[in-house]
Amino acid sequence: MPRKQKPKVFRTATGFHDAYVAAPSRKAALAAWGSKHDLFASGAAEIVDDPELIKEPLAQPGVVFHRSRGTAEEQLAALRPAPNAKRRIPKEEPSPNVHPAKAAPSKKKAAPEKPKLDRTALDEAERILAALEKRHSEERAGMAQREADLQRQRKAHDKRQSHEIDEQRLKTDKFRAIYERAKRN
């Protein structure tokens, strides 16, 4: 009979999050992520052995857990250009045939400024999602603990019942022997 393989925890990046899954093999991890490409071959996926990161996935093998890769502020900072990086705007060269004082004013209109993006709704949605994922994870951990407690109680109950039945069988056998002796006499 083949020995059951203990699952390993694998991680891959999914946007601003990492996806973790406990699976018996790389192939099973790729299937859990829904990937048709070998993310391990390209270095986009890896085995994780950090005890804090593997605790939750090992409690629910086959379930994909998403963890944010930094705060929203850190993620936005990574998208912004460096503060010292300046965009170069090419200057219009005056035509050599036109005197600078007689040059016609430029008819180019300034491009309208793009409105500043508001991430408030997205940040709130991500915060709620993270809170839901955390709550669901805690609920699953609580259920797992209650199941383990129930198994311990059942084991103790079965042991106690087995002991009671064994004692009663001995008593019954003793009284049967006395009865059989009396019946023969």
Image: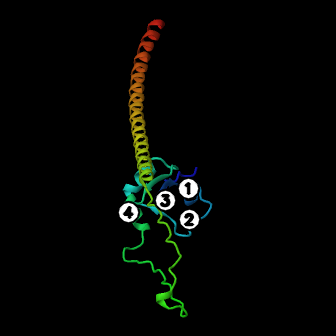
**Camera-side residue of 119 and 127:** 119
For mark 2, what is the residue?
39
Real-space Cα distance between discs 1 and 3?
10 Å
| Image spot of residue 20 (x, y percent) | 47, 56
Circles 1 and 2, Cβ within 8 Å, touching? The answer is yes
Mark in the foreground, 2 or 3: 2
- Badge 2 amino acid: Leu
- Badge 3 amino acid: Phe
Marking on residue 74: 4
Mark in the foreground, 4 or 2: 4
The crowding category of the residue bearing disc 3, from other C-alpha atoms within 10 Å (few below 14, some 14 to 19, many at least 20), is many
Real-space Cα distance between discs 4 and 3?
24 Å
- Badge 4 amino acid: Glu
For mark 3, what is the residue?
10
For mark 1, what is the residue?
33
| Image spot of residue 61 (x, y percent) | 50, 49
Q: Secondary structure at mark 3?
A: strand
Circles 2 and 3, Cβ within 8 Å, touching? The answer is no
Q: Secondary structure at mark 4?
A: helix
Real-space Cα distance between discs 2 and 3?
11 Å
Q: Residue at x 43, y 16 (%)?
A: 172
